[in-house]
Amino acid sequence: MQSSENANEGTAMGQNRWITEMGLGVDVHGADYNKAARRAVSDALRHSSLHFFDVTNKSVQDMKVDVVIGAAEPANIDPAVIAQEIPYGTVTVTVISGGLDVASDDGDDRITMVNAAILVSFDD
């Protein structure tokens, strides 16, 4: 797990990215960044159905899964909690500045929005 301000480092040498999925997660009350981040990852995962394993001789265990989380307060994200949302593969979580917080009218609460990108790669 890592926290970084640069999520544009690209795919590691000897790996090919096969899938990119995006998601948005929101905590409407309470500003729970981990809740919003888990929802963003879930949103991205729920829009995927992978059917290429049989024809590629790859398995879910071969996947390298890079999760990039963008949050207004990156320090409030626990990468280990977010990694638990990914059911397969070798998972790395990178947290960067991003997302959006919207204050309530009275300033006592806020809506917390977190973005997630899930990048799936395989070794050559």
Image: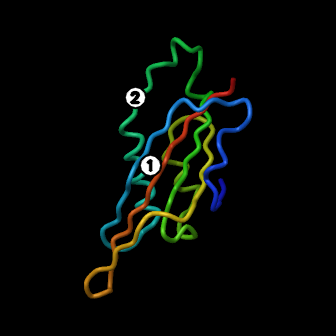
Kind of element beneath mark 1 = helix
Give the quadrant of the C terminus. Answer: top right
- Location of residue 108 in the rendering, given as x and y in whole percent from the top left corner: 32, 86
**Circle number at residue 49:** 2
Q: Residue at (59%, 19%) from the top-left corner?
A: 58
Residue closest to the eye, 57 or 119: 119
- Location of residue 4 in the rendering, given as x and y in whole percent from the top left corner: 65, 60
Q: Quadrant of residue 121?
A: top right
Q: Residue at (36%, 39%) from the top-left corner?
A: 46
* Amino acid type at image mark 1: Val
Residue closest to the eye, 49 or 85: 49
Q: Residue at (41%, 52%) from the top-left corner?
A: 40
Instruction: Work out whether 12 lies above or below 32.
Output: above
CA gap, disc 1 to disc 2? 15 Å
- Location of residue 53 in the rendering, given as x and y in whole percent from the top left corner: 52, 18
| In contact (CB < 8 Å): disc 1 and disc 2 | no
Which residue is the extreme one toward the left? 105
Residue picked out by circle 1: 41
- Location of residue 75 in the rendering, given as x and y in whole percent from the top left corner: 58, 70
Q: Residues within 10 Å of mark 2 (few under 14, many from 20)?
A: few
Which residue is the extreme one toward the right? 13
* Amino acid type at image mark 2: Ser
Looking at the image, residue 54 sits to the left or right of residue 112; the answer is right
Looking at the image, residue 95 sits to the left or right of residue 101; the answer is right
Q: Residues within 10 Å of mark 1 (few under 14, many from 20)?
A: many
